[in-house]
Image: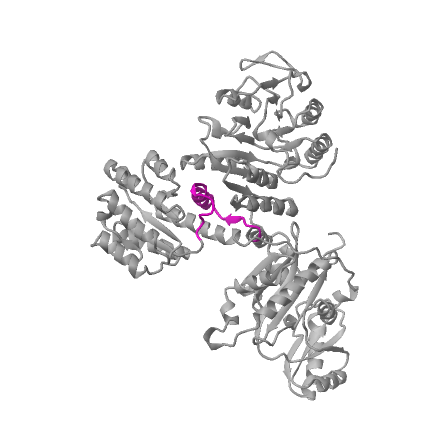
């Protein structure tokens, strides 16, 4: 057997479609962890063998008890272990010997309990890997396969009822949050396919869950609650499977952290937080991140009801209500999120007036109560909007109409015809009403939301999903590692020379050690010039007065040299000074900051933002894992809030953003090439000149990987 991690999702069918389940540590008390799986399997009619295992033998909950897994009459696909932590390794060995394929460890007392527990957990991993068994947990809530009735859980969500069968798959590292999601999905009259709560993730992790649900024929949308990512490669592989299968992944990533930033020595390290990195990873690989359970439910709700391929292509929205007041409320909600409300074409307006002469034909459309007087009128009204080219989706608000039997019949009849006549057009409804009425409309493939705000949230998620799924990331070709001269970390000058070899442009410059030499070099470069202190011990030179700009003659250079050296002696007396750098003034342009930081999970991360001394104040940055293509780098730059400054705002000249993108891409490749040596790179500022004139890095800092990393 191999100890290598299997490809994400491999072997999880044994949890979902188990032919036979053993419960080790089974109990007759249905309120105990060992008693609940037996009780739930029997309650919900699991059709395959149920084998309670307990060394006491006898009978439990009407079933014969076996004293060991080794004594079972047939080999179950899955075993659920509900024994004390100290007894788990022996129970797992028995499962391996019996040929069990999947094991769920419900018990706690492992890595979450300290070093001794972590050692016990590692032992479980070694036993499982050697035996070719997939291990869920420990300290987990296990799995529920609603489709097949296979239960390896003690979740209270099954106390009263099994969730309805459906197409929503749920994977959560937290069992309680996962159970809550199952409950909330059910309350929205949606159905669940599979539920996975991974716990400590000794073996099966959230990436496995995503990949397995992506491969599952019964799952259309994957809702994920993630606290941490344990393996960047496995998560990326899993998201690639989901994207290839056309299964939207919507992730609630909790535990946003600034981990690692406290030790960051550069502007880049301070700005590129790990939470922003996971955001960028999700964007690149097609998963949609949300920030609340409500948003997770809203977007999952909408996605689960759509036919594949019907995501809105843009954010143009047409709103329809039976009153102007509700239309205004809808417009306000749409504007808060960022939807545009395009004007309807004259032909659409004419069709609306022809159907309901009293209707308002602006967007939002005030269709008046007349629209619901007869099915044919509503059908014609909605047909006009379905044929409108200048929109991506239509949202219809029904207020209390579904609570009225007569109006409900009119709506269902008209909507049935609309769905048949315009199967590819996206129509969404906001309406509170009886569960059976809502279910009847949803069966047509029309998402129904309980409120205007939830509808807007769900629609916003659909738009973002389309944008991320429609442009799949193409993995860059492998970049070979290369040696790096240790001198690159010594000072700004050496750092720039190393980056210059990788395609990052810098100004001509030299390091001097006397005022007279500084004046001579300045004369050779041509005035005006810049002087900067050069020291590995002074990463932020301006903070100690170590930079002098716009020096127009030799005497000014000599004086500046003396002033810089005096400032360094006063404010950084312990610093080793390599000299003073002399370089020409760069001229006009827009300042960016570019850099590389090291994420503890995802490795080198590229960052770009508005630069200069206010970089950390403005916090206008974009990050992405390295390496970047030039197109990806360009998209990052265009995503900056202050991009209009580069794009000719208020009569400013167009900046050379293509050259900036090329520089950022080359920098990201440098980071991969020297990933074993370089922890951070800080280019601040990078001067972006007018279009066609290129960019130049005016300052550079390289920070080596710590020997303990």
Q: Is residue 170 left or right of residue 379?
A: right
Coordinates of residue 157 in the picture (x, y in percent): 48, 30
Count of all numbered marks drawn on residues in the image:
0
Residue 616 in which image quadrant? bottom right
Seen in the picture, residue 161 relative to 416 is either above or below; the reply is above
Q: Is residue 443 magenta?
A: no
| Residue 235, image x, y percentages | 61, 45
Up the image or down, 528 lies above or below 686; here it is below
Task: Work out whether residue 361 can be spotted.
Answer: no
Q: At which x and y percent is residue 470?
A: 52, 53
Q: Residue at x 79, y 63 (%)?
A: 486
Q: Residue at x 36, y 53 (%)?
A: 333
Can residue 622 be seen at all in this image of the molecule?
Answer: yes
Q: Residue at x 68, y 71 (%)?
A: 571
Q: Is residue 194 above or below residue 594?
A: above
Look at the image and give the residue range highlighted in magenta.
Answer: 284-312
* Front one among 219 and 204: 219
């Amino acid at each position: 057997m191999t100890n290598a991690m299997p490809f994400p999702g491999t072997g999880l069918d044994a949890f979902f479609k188990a032919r036979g389940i053993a419960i080790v540590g089974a109990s007759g008390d249905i309120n105990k962890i060992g008693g609940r799986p037996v009780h739930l399997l029997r309650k919900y009619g699991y059709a395959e063998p149920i084998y309670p295992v307990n060394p006491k033998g006898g009978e439990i909950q009407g079933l014969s008890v076996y004293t060991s897994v080794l004594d079972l009459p047939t080999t179950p696909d899955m075993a659920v272990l509900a024994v004390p932590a100290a007894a788990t390794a022996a129970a797992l060995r028995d499962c391996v010997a019996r040929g069990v394929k999947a094991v769920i460890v419900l018990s706690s007392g492992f890595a979450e309990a300290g070093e001794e527990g972590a050692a016990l957990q590692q032992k479980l991993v070694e036993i499982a890997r050697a035996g070719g068994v997939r291990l869920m947990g420990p300290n987990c809530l296990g799995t529920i396969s609603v489709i097949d009735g296979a239960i390896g859980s003690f979740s209270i969500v099954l106390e009263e009822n099994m969730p309805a069968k459906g197409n929503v798959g749920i994977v959560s590292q937290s069992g309680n949050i996962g159970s809550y999601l199952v409950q909330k999905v059910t309350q929205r009259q949606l159905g669940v396919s599979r539920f996975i709560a991974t716990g400590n993730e000794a073996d099966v992790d959230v990436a496995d869950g995503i990949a397995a649900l992506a491969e599952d024929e019964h799952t259309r949308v994957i809702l994920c609650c993630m606290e941490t990512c344990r393996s960047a490669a496995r998560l990326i592989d899993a998201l690639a499977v989901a994207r290839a299968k056309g299964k939207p992944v919507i992730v609630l990533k909790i535990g946003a952290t600034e981990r690692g930033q406290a030790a960051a020595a550069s502007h880049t390290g301070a700005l590129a937080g790990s939470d922003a990195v996971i955001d960028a990873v999700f964007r690149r690989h097609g998963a949609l991140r949300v920030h609340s359970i409500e948003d997770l439910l809203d977007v999952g709700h909408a996605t689960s009801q759509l036919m594949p391929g019907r995501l809105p292509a843009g954010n143009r929205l047409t709103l329809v209500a039976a009153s102007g007041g509700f239309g205004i409320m809808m417009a306000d909600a749409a504007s808060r999120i960022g939807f545009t409300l395009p004007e309807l074409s004259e032909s659409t307006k004419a069709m609306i007036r022809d159907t309901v002469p009293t209707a308002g034909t602006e967007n939002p459309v005030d269709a008046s109560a007349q629209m619901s007087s007869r099915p044919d009128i509503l059908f014609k009204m909605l047909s006009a909007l379905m044929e409108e080219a200048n929109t991506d989706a239509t949202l219809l608000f029904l207020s209390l109409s579904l609570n009225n039997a007569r109006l409900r019949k009119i709506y269902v009849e008209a909507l049935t015809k609309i769905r048949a006549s315009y199967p590819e057009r996206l129509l969404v409804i906001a309406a509170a009403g009886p569960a059976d009425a809502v279910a009847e409309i949803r069966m047509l493939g029309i998402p129904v939301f309980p409120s205007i705000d939830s509808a807007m949230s769900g629609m916003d998620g659909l738009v973002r999903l389309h944008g991320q799924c429609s442009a799949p990331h193409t993995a860059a070709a492998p970049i070979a590692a290369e040696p790096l001269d240790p001198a690159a970390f010594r000072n700004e000058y050496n750092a720039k020379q190393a980056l210059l070899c990788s395609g990052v442009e810098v100004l001509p410059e030299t390091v001097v050690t006397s005022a007279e030499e500084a004046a001579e070099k300045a004369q050779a470069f041509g005035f005006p010039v810049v002087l900067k202190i050069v020291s590995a011990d002074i990463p932020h030179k301006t903070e100690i007065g170590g930079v002098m700009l716009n020096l127009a003659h030799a005497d000014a250079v000599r004086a500046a040299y003396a002033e810089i050296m005096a400032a360094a002696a006063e404010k950084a007396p312990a610093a080793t000074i390599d000299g003073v750098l002399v370089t020409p003034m760069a001229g006009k342009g827009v300042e960016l900051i570019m850099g590389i930081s090291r994420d503890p999970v995802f490795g080198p991360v590229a960052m770009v933002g508005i630069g200069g001394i206010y970089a950390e104040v403005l916090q206008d940055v974009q990050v992405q894992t390295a390496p970047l293509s030039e197109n990806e780098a360009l998209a990052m730059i265009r995503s900056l809030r202050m991009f209009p400054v580069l794009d000719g705002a208020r009569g400013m000249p167009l900046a050379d953003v293509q050259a900036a993108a090329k520089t950022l891409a080359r920098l990201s490749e440098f980071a991969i090439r020297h990933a074993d040596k370089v922890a951070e790179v800080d280019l601040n500022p990078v001067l972006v000149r007018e279009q066609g004139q290129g960019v130049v890095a005016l300052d550079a800092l390289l920070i080596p990987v710590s020997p303990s990393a």
